[in-house]
Image (cartoon, grey):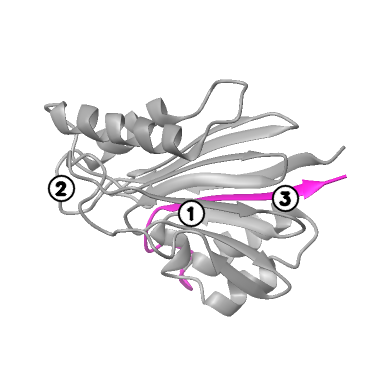
């Protein structure tokens, strides 16, 4: 029986601090949400915090339309909140080797296999952001197989060269993988240019 293994890392780059990662992880099922509060909008951090309600917590595997429905409901709830602004959103469930989810914004999810990138979020809409009440979440579904699922905010994908990400996915140790990417996201001074929020996942056993 194959099991799901993960490694995560979140590190804020003050004064922003608007990235959020919410995870429910069992051996046979993984549910997670990545959210990055939109810059230029007040309340981006509150919007990102409210996406924890999209986290799939039921033991059964959801259908894609259920994930979309949950995201749309949360989009409206965030929009109605007097404090919350807007955010990116990636909602993912992994079970039986199947990666299923939806997204909006500029956070990204890839499956990397044999140095080839499958951009799960490649067709997502950047705007309107989640929390606008008008977000257009785009669904995706793939077999993970022997690939590495890598999902994170723009603090990962905007500041680490693509070839570094791909080569790092060849590392067998997931903790070393996330440490390597965090190191590569830093400036020479050691500072981060943006919040860093990352989850990597594989099927093992």
User: Magenta stretch: residue 85 in it?
Assistant: no
For marks 3 and 2, the one nearer the N-term is: 2
Which percent across, then down, holds residue 122?
43, 65
For marks 1 and 3, give the CA distance.
Answer: 15 Å
Q: Quadrant of residue 96?
A: top right
| Residue at 36%, 59% in the rendered image | 124
Instruction: Give the residues drawn in magenta, as a range.
Output: 187-205
User: Disc number at residue 31?
Assistant: none
**Between disc 1 and disc 3, whose residue precedes?**
1
Marked residue nearer the N-terminal end (1 or 2)? 2
Q: Position of residue 174 (x, y in %)?
A: 72, 53
Where 95 falls versus 176 (above or below)?
Answer: above
User: Is the residue under label 2 in contact with that under label 3 (CB below 8 Å)?
Assistant: no
Q: Which residue is mark 3?
A: 202
Res. 41 mark: 2
Would residue 138 appear left or right of 81 to someone viewing this image?
right
On the picture, is 25 further left or further right than 124?
right
C-alpha separation, residue under disc 1 versus residue under disc 2:
20 Å
Q: How far apart are labels 3 and 2 at the CA level?
A: 35 Å
Neighbours of disc 3 within 10 Å: few (<14), some (14-19), many (20+): many
* Secondary structure at numbered mark 1: strand
The extreme top residue here reads 58
State the residue position of label 1: 152
Q: Residue at x 24, y 50 (%)?
A: 38
Q: Is residue 144 left or right of residue 67?
A: right
């Amino acid at each position: 029986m194959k099991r799901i293994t993960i490694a995560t890392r979140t590190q804020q780059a003050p004064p922003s601090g608007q990235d959020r990662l919410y995870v429910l992880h069992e051996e046979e099922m993984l549910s997670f949400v990545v959210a990055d509060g939109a810059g230029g909008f007040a309340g981006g951090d509150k919007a990102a915090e409210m996406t924890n309600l999209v986290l799939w917590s039921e033991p059964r595997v959801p259908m894609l339309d259920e994930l979309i429905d949950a995201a749309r409901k949360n989009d409206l709830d965030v929009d109605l909140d007097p404090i919350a602004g807007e955010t990116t959103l990636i909602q993912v469930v992994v079970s039986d080797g199947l990666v299923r989810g939806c997204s909006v914004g500029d956070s990204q999810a890839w499956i990397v296999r044999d140095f080839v990138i499958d951009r799960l979020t490649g067709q997502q809409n950047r705007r309107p952001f989640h929390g606008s009440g008008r977000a257009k979440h785009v669904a995706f579904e793939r077999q993970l197989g022997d690939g590495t699922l890598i999902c994170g905010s723009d603090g990962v994908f905007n500041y680490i060269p693509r070839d570094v990400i791909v080569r790092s996915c060849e590392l067998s140790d997931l903790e070393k993988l996330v440490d390597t990417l965090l190191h590569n996201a830093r400036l020479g001074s050691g500072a981060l240019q943006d919040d860093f929020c990352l989850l990597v996942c594989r099927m093992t056993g």
